[in-house]
Image (cartoon, helix red, strand yellow):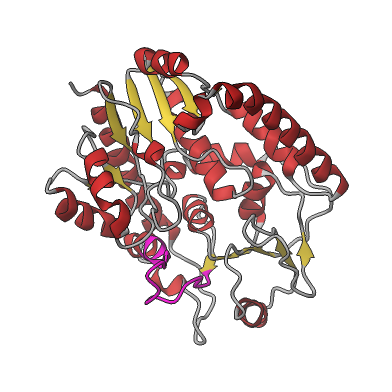
Amino acid sequence: MNITIVTWMGTGNFGTSLQSYALHEFLKQQGFDVCLLKEFSQADFILKNRLLGPIRHIVGSIKRFIKGIICKTNIGKIQKFNKKNYNVVSIHSDRELQHIISTTDVFVTGSDQIWNCYHSYSPFMFLSFVDSVKKISYASSIGTKDFPTFCKYDVKNHLSRFSHIAVREKSSVEYLIHFLGRDDIVQVLDPTFLLRATHWKKFAEKSKFEFSLPTKFIFCYLIGNNSKYEIQLDEIKQKTGIMNVIIVPSLENKDMNFPHCHIYKQAGPYEFVSLIDKAALICTDSFHACALSINMSKDFVVLKRFEDDDPKSQNSRIYDLLNSYGLQSNIYSSDWIFVDSNFNNIQSKLEIDRRDSINYLNNAIYSL
């Protein structure tokens, strides 16, 4: 059976990379022929763009690779990771589009915030180009509370043609049931949970660090550019007594440079997971850093990236995750204290949720 995934592959955001890798890898392990379809628009099929597109892509890749070497960034590692782990399909004409449609048994929209239309409305991420082939979603995330007014009609039309819809956040289930007028919307785990901790530990063994890791350290990965973060990190250091901090700057916050911390710009996906595995504590505002910490039974503390009353707030996705496993106290506050989590109970519940999510995915793929 041929499955085509539509999601963001990731070119620097580690959560994006690892969620797409996990879904792609899990489906491969299940015995499916899997590819990830690179995003396109009809404008890409114009002759000029068809000729210039591949050239621009090659030139851009070379520039990014050279910049990675000169500036000592992780671009080269990410490019190698993508090349090794994905079967990527790019299309440049209507003929190629029709070929991928005719040879695909099921289209799957993957996870991450591909349906966050406040960030970017992309009909492609709603499989607008597919009519006759089965369309399902697995852990697709809205990321916010609703869809913006300007695209609600089109989004509703796109989603009405999905045979199965599973989202990542509980709050999105309730919203979509009302929005679409259907009662079969379900919540499933993020794709990174489909792969067990044993897989991620073997994954981490492929890491290659350019420096020696401290015996005990805090791993810090922050996507937001919040003025409170530096103060909060200092407070966490004092409360835990852990003075060594390794910071991997995010794609969205490349210039993060807190004093008395090791700024590690050369981390690729393998090093990112390895730092989670080896850290005494993870400090983050990233959904996927939280998810991997839970999956790998690692203690972590969450810094709030958004104010809760911000209409573009993405806090709900982290709240849903923490509430599912009784980890509400992991959100940082002035009275936060470092307490080891009871991961035995968490792993028991996670295994049940993983089984339910796999059952949903298999049922959605195989059902008539």
Question: Does the image show residue 150?
Answer: yes
Residue 38 point in image, percent of width and height: 51, 30
Q: In this view, does 94 lie to the left or right of 155?
A: right
**Residue drawn at the location 50% of the way across and 77% of the way down:** 332
In the picture, residue 149 is in which quadrant? bottom left
Residue span colored magenta: 302-319
The N terminus: image quadrant: top left
Q: Residue 325 location in percent, x, y? A: 36, 60
Q: Who's the residue at 69% across and 35% down the image?
A: 79
Foreground pick, 68 / 126:
126
Q: Quadrant of the C terminus?
A: top left
Residue, far bottom: 334
In the rendered image, residue 143, in percent from the top left (x then y), is placed at 39, 57
Where residue 53 sits in the image (x, y, percent)? Answer: 63, 28
Residue 30 among magenta residues? no
Q: Which of 332 and 345 is in front in this view?
A: 332
